[in-house]
Image (tube, helix red, strand yellow):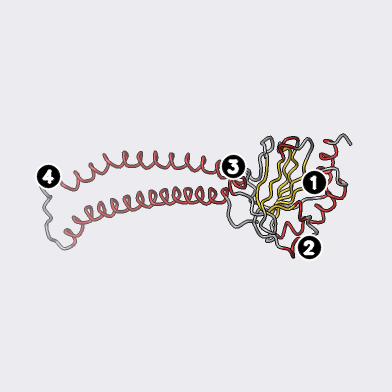
Amino acid sequence: MLPSSDGEVRFEEITLLKKGNNAVQSRQVRGIVAFTRGTAAKRAGTEAQPTAGAASNVPVRPATGQPGVSYRRAIRAVLPSVCIVFLALNIALQYQNSRLSAALDDVRHARGPRPGGMLPQLAGQDLRGQPVVFRFSDLKGSTLLLALSARCKACSDNWPKWRSIVRRLSGRFPVVYADVADSVSDEYVNRFGVPRDRLITRIDLRTRWMHDLRDTPQTVVLGKGGRIERVWMGLLSQKDEEAITALMMSRAGI
């Protein structure tokens, strides 16, 4: 897989926001606990003074104006408001966390080209550095697009299934091999038998990001005019191979 992507950047941003919200909630709880303990300690100290005076046989005169009573009344008056504020903030943070969790799920599942969209062309270079353009918008039938990377182990593991699909299509449909990581070399091409005239690398960044052609491996079936019909992400299963072959054959009326 590629080391970074728009989905991963957004994933990290959402995760950091959630961690920040949780930290704020923890500070709120610690503040209430400290506030409550401090109040209890001051109250205990105020009430313990007459006892200390009685034990030492020293008369304790009541303070004029009764400041301890006034202080406790002030605390009782303010404490409910403080608790309400903390409660409101906690509810707001929980609501934001729920929205962030939903956004996080969207990022996790929003991978690869969107079925129903259009991929009119891929522009890039071949292994010799010469400009290459595959215009899917001009095609009347289906095209199989294989997005790969030489640094992707799953891509290497996917090659037996890819070869089987291409062999079963028997040249009826064009196949395009897209190196979306700019990592394919002559050694890789020779190892896996990639047709050089059907390989494109150094794909323009705008197309790569617009259609999310960054994660690998991807198996994409394009319809007439470059319409994105189906996308398979990751390692293919036998069931996936059958589904891809059946879909391609159905488009040719076979």
What whole-number distance in Å separates the C-alpha atoms at marks 4 and 3?
A: 63 Å
Q: Nearer the viewer, mark 4 or mark 3?
A: 3
Can you say whether 127 is above or below 210 in the image? Answer: below
Residue lying at 73% horizontally and 53% vertically, measured from the top left:
199
The residue tagged 1 is: 240
Task: State the residue in front, 42 or 245.
Answer: 245
Is 220 left, or right, of 9 in this rendering?
right
The residue tagged 2 is: 190
Is 147 left, or right, of 94 in this rendering?
right
> Could you tell which of marks 3 and 2 lies nearer the N-terminus?
3
Residue kind at label 4, given as amino acid type: Gly
Callout 1–callout 2 Cβ contact below 8 Å = no
Q: Nearer the viewer, mark 1 or mark 4?
A: 1
What whole-number distance in Å separates the C-alpha atoms at marks 4 and 2?
A: 95 Å
Residue 117's spot in the image, x, y percent? 66, 36
> Could you tell which of marks 4 and 2 lies nearer the N-terminus?
4
Residue kind at label 1, given as amino acid type: Asp
Residue 164's spot in the image, x, y percent? 85, 52
> Could you tell which of marks 1 and 4 lies nearer the N-terminus?
4
The residue tagged 4 is: 65
Callout 1–callout 3 Cβ contact below 8 Å = no
